[in-house]
Amino acid sequence: MRFTRQGPVMTVDLHGMYLEDAKSLLENWLGHAPAGVTELRVIHGSNRGTVLRDMVQRDLKHPRIQRKLLTLNPGETRLLLKPPKG
């Protein structure tokens, strides 16, 4: 399973995904994210390349993303989410 939820925090694991598939998955999820979710932890990996990491940290844009946080784990990026409008 790619997504797991623990309270207001969702985690998604992108290991093994192609760039465009991962970006599409994230954009779609962000567009339909549950209102109670305030953070998305994106596990993108870092040992076998940086394409997914760079996409998440630099290229991924969405109105729900309030802030991107780097962690001590280079294979993870935290996305703090704005509440949905409406």
Image (cartoon, helix red, strand yellow):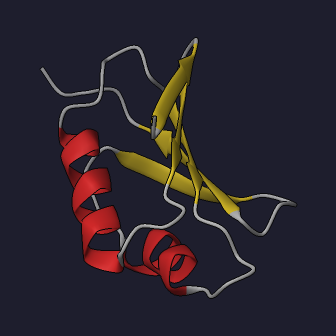
Disc count in the image? 0
Q: Tell me if residue 82 comes above or below residue 18 in the rendering.
A: above
Quadrant where the C terminus is found in the figure: top left
Q: Nearer the viewer, residue 11 or 64?
A: 11
Locate residue 74: give its quadrant.
bottom right
Q: Residue at x 19, y 47 (%)?
A: 28
- The image shows residue 59 at horizontal and vertical percentages of 37, 78
Residue 83 as seen in the image, left or right of residue 32: right
Q: Residue at x 56, y 75 (%)?
A: 53
Q: Nearer the viewer, residue 79 or 44?
A: 44
- The image shows residue 17 at horizontal and vertical percentages of 41, 67
Q: Tell me if residue 40 comes above or below residue 47 in the rendering.
A: above
Locate residue 75: give its quadrant.
bottom right
- The image shows residue 14 at horizontal and vertical percentages of 49, 58
Q: Residue at x 34, y 26 (%)?
A: 83
Q: Tell me if residue 32 comes above or below residue 29 in the rendering.
A: above
